[in-house]
Amino acid sequence: MNLRQNAVIGVFWSGIQLWGGRVISFVVFAFLSRLLTPEDFGLVAMASLFLAIVQTFQDQGFGDAIVQRDEIQPEHLDTAFWTNLLISGILTLLSIAASSMIAGLFHQSELTPIIQWLSLIFVFTGLSSTQQAILRRQLAFKKLAGRSLIATLAGGVIGVALAYLGYGVWSLVAQSLVSGGIGVIVLWSVSRWRPGFRYSRKHFKDLFLFGINIIVIDFLNFLNRHTDDLLIGYFLGPTMLGYYTVAYRLLRMMTELLTSVINAVALPTFSRLQKEPERLRRAFYQAVHYTSLISFPAFIGVAIVAPELIVTLFGPQWMLSIPVMRILAFIGILHSVFYFHKSLVIALGKPSWSLGMTFLNAVSNVIAFSITVQWGIVAVAAAYVIRGYLLSPLEIWVVRKLAQINIKTYFRQFIVPVVGSMAIAAVILGLKFILVGVLGMHLQLAIYVLSGGIIYLLILQVFEPSIWPQLLKLYQLGFVTKPVS
C-alpha cells in the first residue's frame, strides 16, 4: 500500500479517535457543568495552568523528533523513553513541592492538594510518550483511537459519578487521573515495543538537537493559549476564569475535532514527502481545504447560535460565557486555516522558523492580554482575535517562503467554505428574526442546526460534488484496509 492510502487510513482512524473522544468528553462536560460551579472549573483551570507550563519541558520534543526522522534506531527509542521517564519523575516531585507556593500566588489555598494530585499525570505521560510517537510514525491511528476512547470514557464515568455524589472539584481531579492511568494501561497493551536498557549520548543528541526547538515552541504555544487564563485567574478570580474556560474549552474542543483529525496525520505524512516538494504542496492544499470545509461553517454557526447552545447544553447559569464564545469563534476560523502551517514547517526540518512565528505570537498575546484584562473576559477574548488576524499575513508569508506555495491556489481552497458559511449565516439569522420569542431555545437550536446543515449540504452538492465519493473511499479504506507499518 502506498503512502497516500496509509495517510487516508490514518485520517480515518484519527477521526475516530478525536471525534469519538471529544464527543465523550463533551457529553461528560455537559453533565459536569450542571453538577459543578464555575468556581470548581476555575480552580482546576488554575492548577492546570501551572501543570501545563511544566509539561512543556517534559517530552523534550522527542516525540516529534521520532516521527520526523527518516531513519530511527532502537537506541533512539530507548534513550527517549528513559529520558522522558526520568524527567517525568523529577517534574512530579517538583510540582508537589511547589504546590503551596502556586496556591499562594493565586490566593487560593484549595489549589495545593489539587496540584499535588494532578502532578501524577506527568508520570502517566512519561510512560506513554515514546509508544505514542512510534504509533504515530507508523500511522497506526487505529490503536491510538481505541486507547483514547477507552481512557476518556473511563475517566468521564468516574468524574460524573463523583460529581453526582457531591465531591465537587475532586470529581474533575479524579476524571483526569483515571483517564491518564487507564490510557497508560491500554497503550502498553496495544504497543508491541518495549524499552531496552540501552542509553546513548549520541542518540540523545540526535533527538535533542531537533527537539530543543519543539520545547521552546511548545512553551511559547502555552503563552499563546493560556496567558489569557493566567491573567484572568490572577486578576479576576476563579469564578470569572470558570466562565471564560467553559467558552474557550468548547471552542478548543471544536478546533481539535475539526482540524486535529487531519493534522494528526499531517506531520508524519508531510515528513515522508519532504523530498518531493510538489506532492508535499498538494497534500498541504488538500489538508487545508478539507479542514476548512468543515471548520468554517461550524465556527460561524456557533457564533450565531451561542445563546441557544449555552443555555441548552450547560444551563442558564453559564450565560456570561455567551459573548466570549461568540468572539472566540472567529479565532477558531483562523486556527483552522493555520493549523497545518506548523506541521509543514517542522516536516521540512525548519522548526526554528515555526519558533520565530510562535515567539512573535506569544509576545503579542502577552501584551494584548495584559492591557485588556482590566476590562474583563470579553475584552480579553476580543484582543485574542484581533491580534491573530493582524499577524496572519506574516504567517502566510513564512509558509509561502519555505514551501513555495502558490498564494492563489492557497486562497482558492476557501472559496466554497466561505460561500457555504455565508449562506448558513443568512439562513439562521433569518430564522432568528422569525422564531425568537415564539419557540423555546431548545427547539430553536434544533431548527437552526438542521436548517444550516441542509443548506450547506446543498451548496457542497452544487459546488463540490466530488466530496461524496472521496468520503466513501475514506470510509472503505478505514474499515477494510490495514495500514502498512
Image (spheres, rainbow, N blue to C red):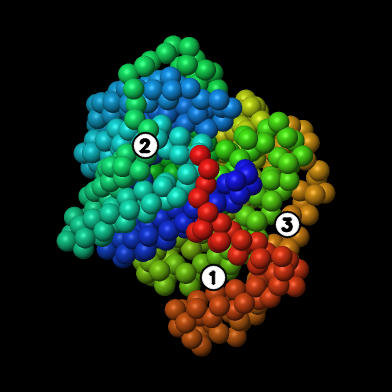
Which residue carries the number 1 mark? 305
Viewer-nearest of discs 1 and 3: 3
Sequence-wise first label, 1 or 3: 1
Q: Which mark is residue 414?
A: 3
The residue shown at (40%, 69%) is: 313
Residue 37: image x %, image y %? 30, 58
User: Viewer-proximal residue, 129 or 159?
Assistant: 129
**Residue lying farthest to the top in this orientation:** 201
Q: Alpha-carbon neighbours of circle 3 within 10 Å: few (<14), some, or many (≥20)? A: some
Viewer-nearest of discs 2 and 3: 2
Q: Amino acid at mark 3?
A: Phe
Q: Which mark is residue 192?
A: 2
Sequence-wise first label, 2 or 1: 2
**Residue lying farthest to the bottom in this orientation:** 438
The answer to whether residue 249 is visible is no
Give the Cα distance between marks 2 and 1.
46 Å
User: Viewer-proximal residue, 143 or 215?
Assistant: 143
The residue shown at (25%, 41%) is: 114
Sequence-wise first label, 2 or 3: 2
| Above or below: residue 311 compared with residue 296 | below
User: Viewer-proximal residue, 259 or 273?
Assistant: 273
Q: Are marks 1 and 3 in contact (CB under 8 Å)?
A: no
Residue 154: image x %, image y %? 28, 54
Q: Amino acid at mark 1?
A: Val
The residue shown at (32%, 18%) is: 197
Viewer-nearest of discs 2 and 1: 2
